[in-house]
Image (tube, helix red, strand yellow):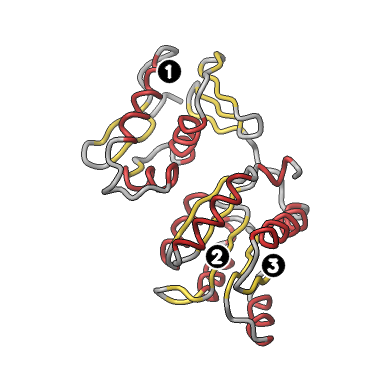
């Protein structure tokens, strides 16, 4: 796989947990950053938050349908970005395929499908759509903290910070949301895809690990909002 594809972010919109899990596992194994959403409302919220490169979008959703989600994503192109959309659905009538593509879909996969087929379609669509997209800056910055998403490296005050993959993913979510508090529930879902009620202590443990590594190189950076979540402290301009 080309490195540009491996660095891509994919949002899976699917309300069937078993299908969402197999897609998430497959794409993560092949180097993609993957987020999931089980409804249209959550899909739009996740797209606004993560600005994915591609959305795998189920058509039949518990709170509506994928057609409306696609319309919303296209209408918010200026803020969400010019992402790619692949519809994934059991609706295989020609009028459905044509209608989905006319709405702005880049491809259309019918259920049941093989994961190899999905992976190949994702790769092909990203190669095609990324040629028309500007190359984003791979470096996330907050004060003296820098994360290079192209090289998976972190530096603070110019000094390298060695992080485990989980610590890296957690810090990336905080950096992507710099300036606001990210809820515990949101972080658990984005980093671990865990249910908040089931896994209530793992986040606190990894926040502690991050603080230990970052605070040795400068003032405390991670802020706790009790009962809510975590964020990065404001830094002087």
Residue bearing the label numbered 1:
213
Label count reads 3
Residue 39 x, y percent position in the rendering? 42, 66
10 Å crowding of disc 1: few (<14), some (14-19), many (20+): some
Q: Is residue 47 left or right of residue 197?
A: right
Q: Is residue 203 above or below residue 97?
A: above
Residue bearing the label numbered 2:
73
Q: Is residue 214 above or below residue 206?
A: above
Considering every residue shown, the one lying at the far left of the view is 227
Real-space Cα separation, disc 1 to disc 3, in angstroms: 42 Å
Looking at the image, which residue is at 63% across and 74% down?
110
Task: Give the mark nearer the N terminus: 1 vs 3.
Answer: 3
Q: Is residue 145 above or below residue 69?
A: above
Looking at the image, which residue is at 58% across and 74% down?
89
The secondary structure type at the circle numbered 1 is helix
Real-space Cα separation, disc 2 to disc 3, in angstroms: 13 Å
Residue bearing the label numbered 3:
106
Looking at the image, which residue is at 46% across and 26% down?
237
């Amino acid at each position: 796989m080309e490195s540009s594809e491996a660095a891509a972010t994919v949002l899976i919109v699917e309300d069937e947990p078993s299908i969402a899990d197999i897609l998430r596992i497959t794409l993560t194994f092949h180097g993609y950053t993957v987020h999931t959403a089980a409804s249209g409302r959550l899909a739009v919220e996740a797209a606004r938050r993560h600005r994915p490169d591609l959305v795998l979008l189920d058509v039949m959703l518990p709170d509506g349908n994928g057609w409306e989600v696609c319309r919303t994503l296209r209408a918010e192109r200026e803020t969400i970005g010019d992402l790619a959309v692949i519809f994934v659905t059991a609706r295989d009538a020609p009028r459905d395929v044509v209608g989905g593509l006319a709405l702005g879909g880049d491809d259309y996969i019918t259920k049941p499908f093989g994961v190899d087929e999905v992976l190949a379609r994702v790769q092909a669509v990203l190669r095609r759509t990324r040629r028309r997209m500007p190359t984003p800056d791979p470096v996330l910055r907050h004060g003296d903290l820098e994360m290079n998403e192209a090289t998976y490296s972190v530096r603070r005050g110019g000094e390298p910070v060695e992080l485990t993959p989980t610590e890296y993913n957690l810090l990336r979510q905080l950096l992507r949301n710099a300036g606001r508090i990210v809820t515990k529930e949101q972080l658990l879902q984005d980093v671990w895809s865990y249910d908040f009620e089931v896994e209530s202590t793992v986040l606190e443990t990894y926040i502690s690990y991050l603080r230990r590594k970052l605070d040795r190189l400068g003032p405390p950076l991670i802020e706790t909002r009790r009962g809510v979540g975590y964020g990065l402290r404001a830094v002087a301009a």
